[in-house]
Image: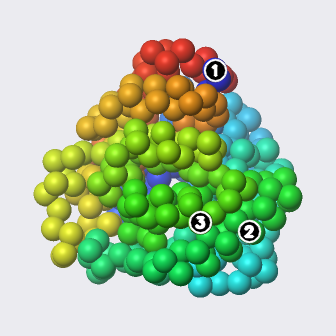
Amino acid sequence: MKAKLGIAPIAWWNDDLAELSDDVSLEECLRQASLAGFTGMETGRRFPMDMRELGPILARYGISVCGGWFSGLLLDGDIEREKERIRAQMDFFIAAKAPCIVYGETARSIQGDRSAPLATKPKLSADEMKTYGRKMTAFAEWCADQKMPISYHHHMAAVIETESELDAFMANTGEALPLLFDAGHLAFAGGDVLRAIDKHHKRISHVHTKDIRRNVIAGLDRTRESFLDAVVKGAFTVPGDGSLDFAAIVGRLASHGYEGWFVVEAEQDPKLNPPLEMAKKGHAELLRVMALSNYKVMK
């Protein structure tokens, strides 16, 4: 089986918390990612959204676009309006030959609101879940027809956060909607990551290898502290530096035949956790567990 290893720039610059950002250029970020061994990077706020400008920069460091976040609003929005909103990024990603757009639902989400405690996350009724599922399926079908699929990112502090919410969402969406599996977010939400892989492996098209620090998460007061508070405290880190068993996670994905990108996405304070050092540690751990599961890591 084949795998590719990518990383997200959120370790260098955090789009929601400016104070958790390293003062480095796009080129320095790419240089460090390449030095650590990664061949892909998801997009971030310092990326020019034009391959005529970005392409030569990526080529200098042997990096390709392996995905990137889109802030979805389809929960409370209109499909035609969502098509308009995603069009520019879609055209850019098609030109970049990216594997997918990472679709994160931000309508009603409190993930970027530091004043909103984790316990106040939005929840959907059964009827709302059915309606949302139909809309997301139709939108995913359109994206696939445009030759740029989305991959749906379940996320802390958003409407699809917990394992039960993910199960309900998957039950109310069609096979046209692929899933981005993020072990860190699901573990933070109290889910069983291996069980979720077993249940939803047929829909997994993209993987974020985000690790967690269980001691930090266990110490949170979810009635008072927000998702961003948790990030500042160090809830997330790279594989090999936290509490999750990535040998088991990667092994379970391998057992179901997953092939594709494994992307390190670990937002934390770059002053306490230097991005290059963390990137090297995460890459080394992924190489170790890939070998255990007989993945061939592609360049």
Q: Nearer the viewer, mark 3 or mark 1?
A: 3
Which amino acid type corresponds to the residue marked 2 in the rendered image?
Phe
x, y (%) of residue 187? 33, 49
Q: Pick whichever of labels 1 and 2 is earlier in the sequence.
A: 1
Check disc 1 and report the residue beneath it. Answer: 1
Q: Counting residues from the N terminus, which is met first, the one under dot 3 or under dot 1?
A: 1
Give the residue at mark 3: 172
**Residue, x 32% and y 66% (percent of image)?**
227
* Quadrant location, the C terminus: top right
Question: Would you say residue 265 is visible in this rendering?
Answer: no
**Which residue is located at x 29 percent, y 54 percent?**
190
In the rendered structure, are the residues bearing label 1 and label 2 in contact, judged by CB atoms less than 8 Å apart? no
Mark 2 nearby-residue class (10 Å; few <14, some 14–19, many ≥20): many
**Few, some or many C-alpha atoms within 10 Å of disc 3 (few <14, some 14-19, many ≥20)?**
some
Q: Which residue is mark 2?
A: 139
Q: Nearer the viewer, mark 3 or mark 2?
A: 3
73 or 195: nearer the viewer: 195
Res. 70 image quadrant: bottom right
Quadrant where the image shows the N terminus: top right
Q: Nearer the viewer, residue 291 or 19?
A: 291
In the image: residue 235, left or right of residue 49:
left
Label 1 element class = loop
- Nearer to the camera, 223 or 179: 179
Q: Is residue 289 left or right of residue 101?
A: left
Visual colour scheme: rainbow
Specify the amino acid type for callout 3. Asn
Horizontal side of residue 278 vs 146, given as left or right: left
**Helix, strand or loop under label 2:** helix
